[in-house]
Amino acid sequence: MSEHSITEQQVLDALRSVVDPDLHRDIVSLGFVKDVKICDGNVAFKIELTTPACPVKDLMKSQATQAVLQLPGVKSVNVEMTASTRSRSIGAEDLLPTVRQVVAVASGKGGVGKSTVAVNLAVALAQLGAKVGLLDADVYGPSVPLMMGTRETPPVINDKIIPIERYGVQMMSLGFLLPDDSAVIWRGPMVAGTVRQLLTDVEWGEKDYLIVDLPPGTGDASITLSQSVPITGVVIVMTPQDVAFTIAGKAVAMFRKMEETLRRPIPILGIIENMSGFACPHCGQVTSVFAGKGAKYAADKLQVPFLGSIPLDPNISVSGDEGVPAVVAHPESAQAKAFREIAQALAAQCSIHSMADHTLLRDIPYMERG
């Protein structure tokens, strides 16, 4: 074969050996390969991934390069990695039509670090190149303003509240609108109405991901969000204790029950274990603190993905109190690394569910789709 006889079809056939590990299909049949160009043995093309937070982006680029280099006559390969976040199913009455993915962060009870997880996941996704919003829907104890280090009053333009931006994340919280010393007695209809207003009265604009920090438990805010917006899915945060497993199971059961009521899917995107052990700041060794089977066991029992675990570190609490998320304040720490890896795993689950109606993806195992 001469160098001039290399064809686009031969390049595509070679690239069929590169398989997306989350979607279990080759990148050609998934439609990821774009703009193939061949000139004098030099091959160039783009690979458009389903999220900028793809955890295997570098591996896929390397595999694609090597696959095409094996073709006789190929002198060089130039691969440009791009991303276009796949969107959830958006209907005509959707309250957030410009937001591609809506992820609720929930817990069966308070005190598990749910808000800390939500904040750091949002910032980690932004650091990975995504357009991210963060909605603090925890009306009982809005803590996002403290953790993100701002008490600004959001401006209003054309009757729309403009989110406050910090660390690359646009955010909205009831904490921006209420005085620090105010006490509000929340009743069910008030919670539902407030959450709906935070969705509709805020100018979210185009976003790859909107992370929603729900109140702990299984109350009105969770129900309102699920009823108002076809969310991509839910992430459950728990600690390692056995009692936490029982409570997390109740949260999963609630969302599955709501699936039946609403007659549309509310996928459990995965379980995250927070405070999984104490990470020594000197030697890095992780020591278990809480007894229990842990979130991995819970995920297996509940048949949902396990997204990862985050060890205890006093710096996380301190940095949160100082208004600097751990992934910003201590980017090289084990905790920051865990948040970034979980953010990538979460993005992968969003992609899987957004493409699940595609005929090529209907046989993805339940354990992987959640």
Image (spheres, rainbow, N blue to C red):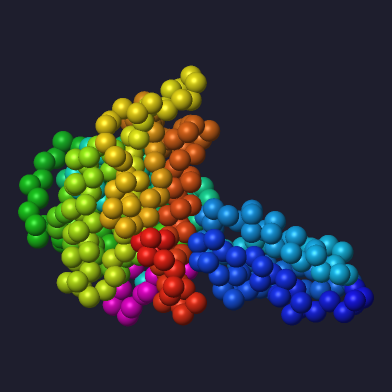
The answer to whether any part of residue 94 appears in the image is yes
Span colored in magenta: 86-96
- Residue at 34% across / 42% down in the picture? 273
In this rendering, the count of numbered labels is 0
Q: Position of residue 233 (x, y in %)?
A: 33, 62
Quarter where residue 269 is shown = bottom left
Toward the viewer: 23 or 313?
23
- Residue at 31% across / 41% down in the picture? 294
Q: Is residue 273 magenta?
A: no
Q: Position of residue 27 (x, y in %)?
A: 61, 69
Placement of the N terminus among the 4 image quadrants = bottom right
Q: Position of residue 117 (x, y in %)?
A: 35, 43
- Residue at 64% across / 54% down in the picture? 59
Magenta span main SS: loop
Toward the viewer: 322 or 45?
45
Placement of the C terminus among the 4 image quadrants = bottom left
Q: Position of residue 39 (x, y in %)?
A: 85, 73
Horizontal side, residue 14 vs residue 257: left or right: right
Quarter where residue 241 is shown = top left
The answer to whether any part of residue 132 appears in the image is no
- Residue at 81% across / 73% down in the picture? 38
Q: Is residue 89 magenta?
A: yes
Horizontal side, residue 138 vs residue 26: left or right: left
Q: Is residue 32 above or below residue 133?
A: below
- Report the residue that reaches farthest toward the right: 2
